[in-house]
Image (cartoon, rainbow, N blue to C red):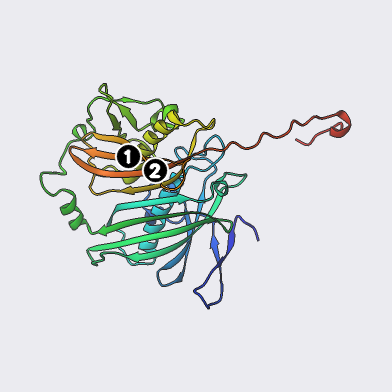
Amino acid sequence: MDQLHELSTRVPGAPGTAVVDASLQFLQPVSRQLVHRAAVAEVFITDALQVSEGRFLVGAQWPRDHALYYPDAQGMSDPLLLTETVRQALVYLAHEYCGIPLGHRFVGSDTYFEITDHEALLVGDTPLHLTLDVQWSWVANRPPRRFGMRVDAVVSVAGRECARAGLSVYAVDERLYQRLRWQGTKSPGRDEAARVGHSAATRLPAADVGRLRAKDSVLGRTETGEWRLLVDLHHAVLFDHPGDHIPLMVTLEGARQLSHRLVHRRHDAPAGAVLRAVRMDCPAFADLDEPVRLCAQLQPPATASDVTGLRITAVQREDTVATVTMEWLPRVLPAVPAEVTFSRGTVGSGAAV
């Protein structure tokens, strides 16, 4: 079977039932509107199958390289691709299988992931094909104006389980969204200059926050030493389409960059550290026109002594808009291969090119 066309997935049934054979397609991305992306290149979901009530298989393809979510120096896929892929999976299932209209606004409340096998996420000679075994749950669901939903997914590559991830979202119609979004003193009628005006903070160099391009750094610092989330509405990935608040993925990227800087400054491992787990709660909207402070606190290890835990709190005005807990592991460098010597007799007189 050509792996570029489909992947046979053996799905464990409920106890006492037969194993289900299913085929997920990886030929092309699904419609971009069904995952709320403007650029086709930013769509990772390729297919989905309903296995039973509330259970789905979702196929996704991760690129070998990406403008923002690129592999690290050791070739491991960017862990934040897990969050974006689960987000797209939820939105796709909501529209395609669960009857939620396209016009509804989706607002994330919490998300998590835990990587159990980093080696399975190493980038090879072809894009990674991932299978998400998704459990769908309705939470505080009040249709047709408000839908509450949660997905929990077991992620595998070529049948090799490597991560778990989840996301909780509520989707509301436009009228209810406007009432929730602009309640109190907030008003949507702000001019563009006011929306992007932040107090002075110097953007950190990309290398200091684990990024390659200067414009991908979203972390700034003021003269008083305060960390800031910097918003660039023209960033093609983080702001794939216009919005009226700071997206969850932007705040998560800022937390990741601050955590990366702090962890890599204190870690003794020669290759630094690798992100193992994330849990994020978003109790409030973050507006585009006021500074967001990022506050970091070292957390005691929850599982093992070699785990470095950090809690990043995003604060706007005096309100907490997000709390992100991250766990990092020291990276283990691969063994250095033995030196290989060649002789004319073993190499021959010609070589394929």
Above or below: residue 149 compared with residue 336:
below
Label number found at residue 312: 1
Q: Position of residue 308 (x, y in %)?
A: 43, 39
Local SS, label 2: strand
Pointer 2: what residue?
326
Q: Amino acid at mark 2?
A: Met
> Is residue 103 rendered to the left or right of residue 93?
left
Q: Which amino acid does the dot numbered 1 rest on?
A: Ile
**Residue found 67% across the figure and 33% down from its top:** 336
Nearest the viewer among 249 and 145 is 249
Asked whether, in this view, residue 293 is left or right of residue 274, the answer is left
Location of residue 82 with respect to 204 vertically, above or below? below
Does 283 sit above or below residue 139?
Answer: above
Q: CA distance from mark 1 to mark 2?
A: 8 Å
From the top left corner, tell me how far across and down residue 292 is, in percent.
Answer: 25, 36
CB under 8 Å between callouts 1 and 2? Answer: yes
Q: Quadrant of residue 349?
A: top right
